[in-house]
Image (tube, coloured by chain):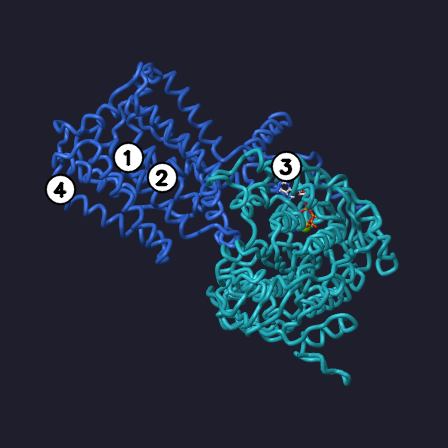
Amino acid sequence: MSQDTTTRPEAPISGPVPGGDSTNALSRLAALWRLSGSSTGVLAGLLLLGAYLGATQPIFLTWGNITNVVASNSVVLVLAVGATFVIISGGLDLSTASAAAVTGMAYGLLLQHGQNALVAVAGALLVGLLLGVLNGVLIAYVKVSFLVVTLGTLSVFESAALVMSQGKTLNVFSRPGFAPIYRITNGDVGGIPYLMIFDVVLVVAAALVLRYTTFGRGVYALGSNREAARLNGINVARTTLSVFVIAGLAAAVASLIQVGRLTGASPGVDSTLLLTVVAAVLIGGTAYTGGDGGVGGTVLGVLFLGVIQNGLTLSDVSTFWRGTVNGTVLIVAVTLGVARHRGWLTINRGKKAQSRA
Amino acid sequence: MNNGAAPLVEVRGITKRYPGVLALDDVSLSVRAGEIVALTGENGSGKSTLSKIIGGAEQPDDGVLLIDGEPTVVANPATALRLGIVMISQELTLAPHLTVAENVFMGRLPRRGGLVDWPAVRSRARTELAALGVHVDPRVKVGDLSVELQQEVEIARAVSSKARLLILDEATSSLSETATERLLELVREQGRRGVAVLMISHRMPELYATATTAAVLRDGRMVGVVPLPETPEPRLVHMMVGRELNDYYGGRQVTPGPVVLDVRDLASDDGALAPTSFQVRGGEIVGVAGLVGSGKAHLGMALGGAIPATGEVRVNGTRVVLGDPRRALTAGIGLVPDDRKRAALLPTRSVAHNMTLSWLRTLSRFGVVPGRTERRRVREAIAEYGVKTSSPNKLITQLSGGNQQKAVLGRIFALGCPVYVLSEPTRGVDVGSKSQIYGLLQKLTAGGAAVVIISSELPELIGLADRVLVCFRGAVRGECSGEQLTEQVLNAIAVSGHIHTDDSGEAA
Ligand SMILES: Nc1ncnc2c1ncn2[C@@H]1O[C@H](COP(=O)(O)OP(=O)(O)OP(=O)(O)O)[C@@H](O)[C@H]1O
Ligand SMILES: [Mg+2]
């Protein structure tokens, strides 16, 4: 045989990194990364970030700061949990932040009209449900693309919220019906904020639904292969409607938390909220193409963005940077996820390989 | 040494490990110019893995690949293409949103002055396709074509790119008999011209009609290389599965019971299937033959509620609402669609979740899936249907093609339906497992199920079915049973709609 060994791979692995040992360790790390679940990346990122901030910002690891991070990210978390269902099913709800503005307004108006706590909360939830039904019916039964529908309702809901209060912020602090929500969103038991307990319960419930119910399995099946789901008896339309209803209810709950923390219902929609919510879900490893992911990852995604935000605040960086950071993190995280999925980032000896030219 | 004597492609000591499996274990093989090597072995024995390594789609963990006697690293499929290695894979790799012409010339569109020369693309695509006897408009989107036509387009693309080594990984599995015959003739022709061919197929007659050598893999090891038409089939099968296969199709002692499936004037809304009527008794297996586009696939889909249809379908006397897979399933019609990737698999989910998909409604209690029962049933089904996987939690797309099919079949068989409609049920399944699946089918029918089996493999239909309906141009044109159940008769009706022998008269 001709021994033109320039191209013979003498060692099983001859990567771009010199030195057998480090290459091996690296390739093992890379293999581990490829094998790991889709949210280990963020978890690692979160731990690194936490360690860094813990070392550089003495305040970071104080209980007060931690509860602050949790409380200030609960709105995003609740919306993101709802969005997780939608995204796993292969859709996207762009109207979620606007829907929250509408339900917040509904809650505020009901309180201003002297309704008691129960009626006001139930009213907000009902409005959220109806908004979800509106999205869901158009998408699942009229069969309009979810992008078109929720882009449309994004705008409609946003302006509806403004119309409802003539653009004014409704102060509800002095309303008697506001007390329970205020207590829940600001109070604590034995130092643990009610909100933190609520978040944990919500996340666990959502995770159980996704994992152990027929509905949850249907949501995954839908996002993974709609036709296979349909042929195996999954009610595609009803499941699609349901995920948008869940998103609508999540918007209502998120708005209650928002109003509770701000003691007023504002008709304006925070322009970064939608991006933060969707980014959190995707960073958490839920596939934007649907069919893969979960709320566990979403929690990590929310925490990751929340901690970055917290770190910026603690380090006195202007909040104007927030969007830049969130957007960049989104792109980097999803890119890394895609890379793992395609098996890149293995120490690919193929890269250096050459055809015989 | 001189390169003329060296094989075109040779692998030495190739090892490939996936998490939990040793897919290839010290495998060596060589393919010379003009040689047609059949790579055979059971599902999951590593055939696709080996061909992916040669085709540059995967890298070995160990071992060397030599081309013309020179060690070479085939880093990716593009490199392989430059080296003249063209691969047609088990999974279609066409872009569904592009036209046929664009797909045929993907990556090498003829240009003029920097711009793509579209008229040339279309006319050259037309020529290439016509040369292969594929009659399809180059302007159609590939996604709108049937699986078979898509596969033919893929083959046209491979052939037109002037290969030195052609790798066919179950390229014929979604082709009809005639298209298969055309492809095999093409392969022989390429062989005569000095192209080396590595072909993978689970259809023994194809291998015997085409290949010059058979290389047998078992559990990732090369167990032998034998010359082809000479080696008797039982011996080759024995090398593959490690045991004798007696009673290939199995038999059953069933007296057909009452009519279970009663179909009257079933027609698909898109016109691909004209009104069709037939009955299937409990314990009966009825085959459906026909060319691609004859409406046989639509018959299956209409029965399973997958496409809108009119007419009357009754299961055990109860009328089934058409066009709704949920209702069909509830009524007891279990459908296995022919296009596994498009209509059966959840590619992002595990083997377990793919199997449970069909069972959700029967398995769950008040909308909750009982975890322990689910795991147990998945384990049982994996064992019973011989799905080879290192874990139920493995992604379904990481199974070998045949094992994916076994998972899809198993999940439907486990439902215990009164009626089964199986479209190409053994596509990509190895000989041993085929025999096992036939056995399971016989068992289902012995239990009183009515089975409709739609297949492009005539031997399978003849071996299994009590009678065979033949579709031609969208309608059932003939029914054969007993003496008449031969490949000649079935072919004749499939091709012309009637039997053109003198003593004809049976074509309804
Ligand atoms: N990407 C992957 N990840 C993990 N395991 C894999 C992957 N690809 C293949 N395998 C495993 O490697 C083994 C060999 O698979 P391969 O696809 O080569 O089989 P095959 O001989 O082509 O079978 P078939 O006849 O069913 O197509 C199988 O056990 C399979 O599960
Ligand atoms: Mg294979």
At which x and y percent is residue B72?
70, 46
**Where does label 2 land, which residue?**
A82
CA distance separating discs 3 and 2: 31 Å
**Where does label 4 land, which residue?**
A165
Q: How many marks?
A: 4
Locate residue A10 relative to residue B365 in the image: left or right.
right
Circle 3/circle 4 CB separation < 8 Å? no
Locate residue A187 relative to residue A212 in the image: left or right.
left
Q: The disc labelled 3 sits on which kind of residue? A: Ser
- Compared with B29, A345 (above or below) is above
User: What secondary structure is found at the residue carrying circle 2?
Assistant: helix
Circle 2/circle 4 CB separation < 8 Å? no
The residue closer to the viewer here, B299 or B143, is B299
Establish whether labels 2 and 4 are both on one chain: yes
Establish whether labels 1 and 4 are both on one chain: yes
Q: State which tag comes first along the sequence, 2 or 4.
A: 2
Give the number of the disc on residue A254. 1
- Compared with B32, A47 (above or below) is above
Q: Residue at x 47, y 44 (%)?
A: A220
The residue closer to the viewer here, B124 or B133, is B133
Chain of residue at mark 3: B
Q: The disc labelled 4 sits on which kind of residue? A: Ser
- Binning the other alpha carbons within 10 Å of mark 1 as few (below 14), some (14 to 19) or many (20 upward) gives many
**Where does label 3 land, which residue?**
B391
Circle 2/circle 1 CB separation < 8 Å? yes
Locate residue B468 relative to residue A121 in the image: left or right.
right
- Binning the other alpha carbons within 10 Å of mark 2 as few (below 14), some (14 to 19) or many (20 upward) gives many
